[in-house]
Image (tube, helix red, strand yellow):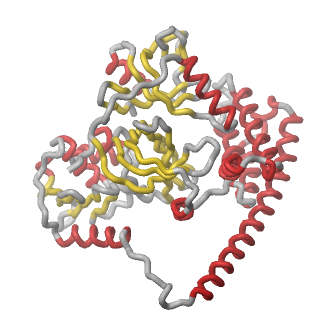
Amino acid sequence: MNYLTDEQVAQLAPDASSLKAGRDLSHEPKWLNFQSNERVLWGEVQGSGKNPYQTQIDLTNTAFKCSCPSRKFPCKHGLGLLFLVAKKNGEISSAIEEPSWVSEWMNKRSAKVNKPEVSTEEEISPEVLLAQAEKQAQAKAKRQEERYLKVQNGIAELELWLKDLVQAGLLTVPQKGAHYFERMAARLVDSQATGLAGLVKSFNKLDFFKNDDWQKESLELISKIYLLIEAFNRLDQLPPLVQEEVKARIGWNIQTKELLERNDIETIKDHWLVIGRQTTIEEGLTMQKNWLWGLKSQKNALVLNFAFGGMAIETPILPGSIAHADLAFYPSNTPLRATVKNYISTVDYLPEPISGLSSWNEAHAKAIDILAQNPWTDTVPLLIEQVCIVFHQGKYYLQDAHETILKIDSTVSNEQIWKLLAITGGNAVSLMVLYQFDSVRPLGLVQNYEYLLLD
């Protein structure tokens, strides 16, 4: 089986307590039995009840099911079973025949994915089908027009609000209070401009007391919002792909089903190295950002996954792994966001060595080129070679071969920095990073045919 490493399993834990409990259950004597085949891993573990808990894991789409009462996904038993397999390097007993409680679940999942579409051409005449298609197109156009008017009204109100904010001056921003920004964001949500609402909410994430750069960051937020307003007001004058980018930033999201049905979508088949993951939880919504790097195409990709109320996120791509897959990219003049169109397999090692940029100046030039095409860009994934950690005036930096330094982002913990120091011994290495123009976030270490995830 294609087993996960200890680090990859840890990435699946919904919280710290589940991670600890999962590691505690990774000892073989605690399991009554455990086996696997190519598609599923299963096992039974004695819990507090009379009957053992039945745990099963879909290895193709990384989904979990357990008979325990936990509401967490995955639960500690699913994590424990994966940790156990990782300890044994995947060398566990295999079985072709599955227990009925395993095959029933897996067959239902397979039937759902492979459910054939029912043909209606023989039952409905072409004239009726054409009439239905025209009716659906008209209804869709009407909905789009209604939404456009809603967004237009919301943006008109936002423009007045923004001008008042600027006229009062940046020094008044900390005095506004969280409710001032939340109220404007709520109005934008009502106007179906959720992307703009997210930008407005970002004011409440600024640290006005400990961060000396809050005025600069406030001005950047104001500039991005104003630029989106102006772009929307001139939407019909922009190139088609720029229009798509502007609409996506405002909050017009293309549904995955619609994306995959379009013929004009860029699709790339490659071995995709999952260089890192960022997970945020806000108002009950879990958003998972998966950053990918195409080994042959040298293209970056961002795959977003969402879940409500602590539900599990099913995805075959895991940080640190190499996914052989087709990615479909959302339309943009600088396409980055993508969705997995066809997952083929997981590769255990880099099929070929990869090379990156040689200096921060080269990285900055690349980022500026992207920014010129898409002014709302704030993060650029890239591979930088021959960099080492240096400590200067109480802060950590990454120094390139030309002794140019770039500050490590403040969100990177000391534990992550110490881990990188321990692995590299202070020597220069090749790093995958998220370049953020004035700071950088290390994601992983590239060594020959291996990728070592830092988180």
Closest to the observer, 212 or 230: 230
Residue visible at 27% across and 71% down in the picture: 107
Q: Quadrant of residue 58?
A: bottom left
Quadrant, the C terminus: top left
Q: Quadrant of residue 450?
A: top left
Residue visible at 49% across and 13% down in the picture: 399
Closest to the observer, 269 or 417: 269
321 relative to 197 in the view: left or right: left
98 relative to 105 in the view: left or right: left
Q: Is residue 12 visible?
A: no
7 relative to 118 in the view: left or right: left
Residue visible at 56% across and 90% down in the picture: 125
Q: Is residue 121 visible?
A: yes
User: With respect to residue 396, does 1 lie above or below?
Assistant: below
| Count of numbered tags | 0
Closest to the observer, 412 or 8: 8
344 relative to 301 in the view: left or right: left
Q: Position of residue 228 (x, y in %)?
A: 75, 44
Q: Position of residue 303 (x, y in %)?
A: 49, 48
Residue visible at 34% across and 18% down in the picture: 424
Q: Position of residue 153 (x, y in %)?
A: 83, 58
